[in-house]
Amino acid sequence: MSRPLRVLVADGWYHVTARGNERRAIFREDRDRTRFVECLGEMAQRYAVRMAAYVLMDNHYHLLLQTPQANLSAAMKWLNVSYTVWFNRRHERAGHLLQGRYHAALVESEGGWLRVVADYLHLNPVRIGALGLGKTKRSGALEGPTPEQVAERLSVLRSHRWSSYPAYAGYTRPPEWLAMREIFERTPGAAANPQRRYREHLEGGLRQGMPERPWAQLRAQLVLGSENFWRQIRGEGDRAEMTALRKLERRTSWEEVVRAVETVKGEEWMAFRDRHGDSGRDLALYVARRHCGLTLAELGAKVGGLRYNAVAQAIRLFEQKLSRAPVRTLTQKVESLLPIRP
């Protein structure tokens, strides 16, 4: 089977989805869902991804995210592999969890497309056969729901914990890594009370019926947007007008992390790297894992050939020490010295 095509651009917005192998469940219980959401937050931090919306269903998930550094493939590989390894260990299984690679469609940031996709994600729990909104209802908007249907659909929408909708609607506190501003800015009247306005927008629309799926306007299974946006992606338009095609920004380098740690500790790297009982090496590993986008194996090579599992353990142990104020303050000082990318 050929690999799905990718359109990878800096600052690109993507609708990403992946399904369980043979359409089997990838979330068997709430602990699985909790772990996947934790992975989303870690991916957002580790790869500088802006996560705007998500929804977890039993056998698949949907994401709406932005990649300032055109690193969607690396971020998604980390997410899917990390969760699969964890899931297989927890449930004592082996083999593929997901059906092939993820699918990604580049979404135009102008013209309301982002909010349309976010709405679609948030309404996924309602689009099920048990509510009369299954796959047989794909074409067009659905109109005229009964009061009973409206009540049932609103109940499902509001009670589905494994989605970014409760945070958007103000029902729960949003995680720090959830980037809601772009969707709020594209919701009319949201300036004063964005959560209430988005809640009224989505739930009010649900009372009228279900909006049409946006995928009928997907071009070549790759791009969702206007004709002009499609031409720009194909290289037929003025690429200078498209902010999503700016030059790729650099990530923080390992050398910059080392220099920051040296400055805070007041010592050269080789003086403390292998010193027994000194946490400087693990501090550098922890910060680099968050800011450099390096794999565990690459980090191991940076510190003298440490195996990837030993790197993972070192980072994990250092994270446990962050509950102590002196360690947390030291880490914050190091991160404050890292260069800010324009």
Image (spheres, rainbow, N blue to C red):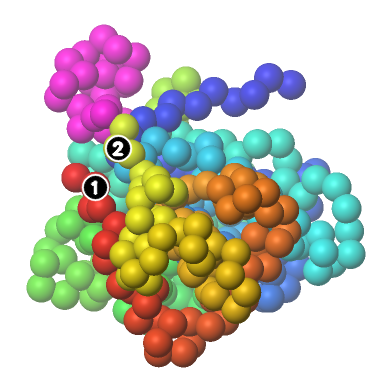
Q: In which quarter of the image is the C terminus?
A: top left
Measured in 3D between alpha carbons, the distance from the residue under mark 2 to the one under mark 1, in whole angstroms, is: 7 Å
Q: To which quarter of the image does residue 246 belong? A: top left
- Per the image, is 304 magenta? no
Answer with the quarter of the image where residue 87 lies. bottom right
Q: Which of 77 and 276 is in front in this view?
A: 276
Instruction: Please state the extent of the stretch shown in magenta in the rendering.
Output: 225-247
Q: Is residue 2 left or right of residue 280?
A: right
Left or right: 17, with 51 as reference point? right
The location of residue 110, given as percent across then percent down, is 21, 39
Residue 230 covered by magenta stretch = yes
Task: Choose the circle earlier in sequence order: 2 or 1.
Answer: 2
Report x, y in % for residue 192: 10, 73
Where 196 sits versus 300, above or below?
below
Asked if residue 114 is positioned above or below residue 89 in the image, the reply reads: above
Residue 295: give x, y in percent of width and height: 59, 48
Residue closest to the eye, 61 or 112: 61
Q: Are marks 2 and 1 in contact (CB under 8 Å)?
A: yes
Which of the numbered marks, if any, corresponds to residue 244? Answer: none
Q: Which mark is residue 341?
A: 1
Please state which of residues 240 and 230 is positioned toward the viewer in this rendering: 240
What residue appears at the point 16 percent right and 75 percent down from the top-left corner?
193
Q: What's the amino acid at mark 2? A: Glu
Q: Please, what secondary structure does the residue beneath circle 2 have? A: loop
Mark 1 residue type: Arg
Residue at (37, 77) in percent of width and height: 330
Position above or below: 316 against 112: below
Q: Residue at x 48, y 87 (%)?
A: 323
Quadrant of the drawing holding the N terminus: top right
Q: Name the residue under label 2.
A: 249
Q: Please tell me whether residue 253 is drawn above or below residue 54 in the rendered image.
A: above
Q: Position of residue 309 (x, y in %)?
A: 73, 59
